[in-house]
Amino acid sequence: MEVTALFTLLLLKFTLLNSYTLKSDAAFSITPNRLQHFQFDTVSFHCEGSDGLSKLRIMKNSKESDPECDIETTTSCTIQRAYPSDNGEYWCENNRVNISVTAGSVILESPVLPVMEGQHVTLSCRSKTTSTNLQADFFKDGRLIMKSSSAETTISNVSKSDEGVYKCSISGVGESPESWLAVREPHSKAPNPPKVLFLLWIAVTVLMLALVLLLMGFLHIRNRRVCEDAADHPDSVTYAVVVTKPREDKGLTLQTQLIIKVQSQTRAQNRRVKKMMKNPHSNLFILL
């Protein structure tokens, strides 16, 4: 029983570890790949959790709910005609993004997911009414940082200092909503808690396995000693006293008992008749 319990515990630990490490591997993407969208655009979310199912959630007005999807599968949600009412914070397990749907004429195209330090990021200012390159102004945290004649700007070797709130404007067309540009440290520099936890669980698993092997060895040695003791003392026999009780005829019916009584009386009468025949001189005395 102890061995079974230990193996069950090891299996449970491995299952929990597996579910925890897979949790950080959720696949999340948005099509089109931007945080801002025009009203009536079609927007698709792909969110695949560790169990292969969608974990997409939305936060609106401080209330958590399921997104309102026109087309929904186990891992995707498609809004065929987006409205400003679809604005909110969407998240897929540990990935969170703020989606903005505007009825205006200008949006800022920026990365959906956080970018890594050292990468190059291109921000584009897009007009709904025209596709020609227009002069655009780009702002970070409310301050003008760039004037571009091609309606786009590139940030080279992104660092944590580039993280902030960005927007753009096109003269004579309009201004975009604001979006947050997130910057993360490279994976090589950032700590990796799942990996550390995985190594810790490996050590615990090896320790538990060693304990199981020790326990099995102890049980094997004990059973072997018992067998050797029995072989060394073959005359040591345990006796048991068995006491039997006479069987009672409890199943005899009244009719059966009467028949047995009549048969006994008949046998007695027959014995008396035989005696009379053997001794004819005492017949009268016996009959009397």
Image: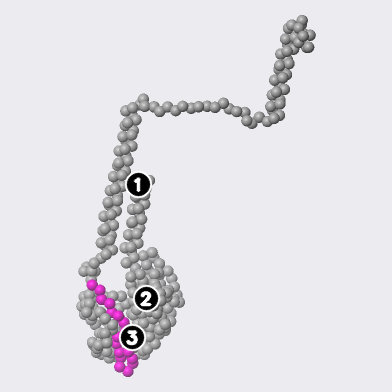
Q: Do the residues labelled 2 and 1 touch (CB within 8 Å)?
A: no
Q: Name the residue under label 1.
A: 3
Quadrant in the picture for the C terminus: top right
- Residue 31 at least partly seen: no
For the residues labelled 2 and 1, the Cα–Cα distance comes to 46 Å
Q: Which residue is drawn at 32% across and 84% down?
A: 178
Q: Residue at x 39, y 77 (%)?
A: 62
Q: Mark 2 points at which residue?
A: 90
Q: Name the residue under label 3.
A: 177
Report the front residue among 76 and 284: 284
For the residues labelled 2 and 3, the Cα–Cα distance comes to 17 Å
Q: What residue type is labelled 2?
A: Tyr
146 versus 97 height, above or below: below
Q: Are marks 3 and 1 in contact (CB under 8 Å)?
A: no
Q: Where is residue 242 in the image (x, y as percent from the top left)?
A: 48, 27
Q: Which amino acid does label 3 sit on?
A: Pro
56 versus 264 height, above or below: below
Helix, strand or loop status at disc 1 = helix
Report the front residue among 192 and 188: 192
Q: Residue at x 39, y 81 (%)?
A: 87
* Foreground: disc 2 or disc 1: 1
- Of the residues under marks 2 and 1, which one precedes in the sequence? 1
Helix, strand or loop status at disc 2 = strand
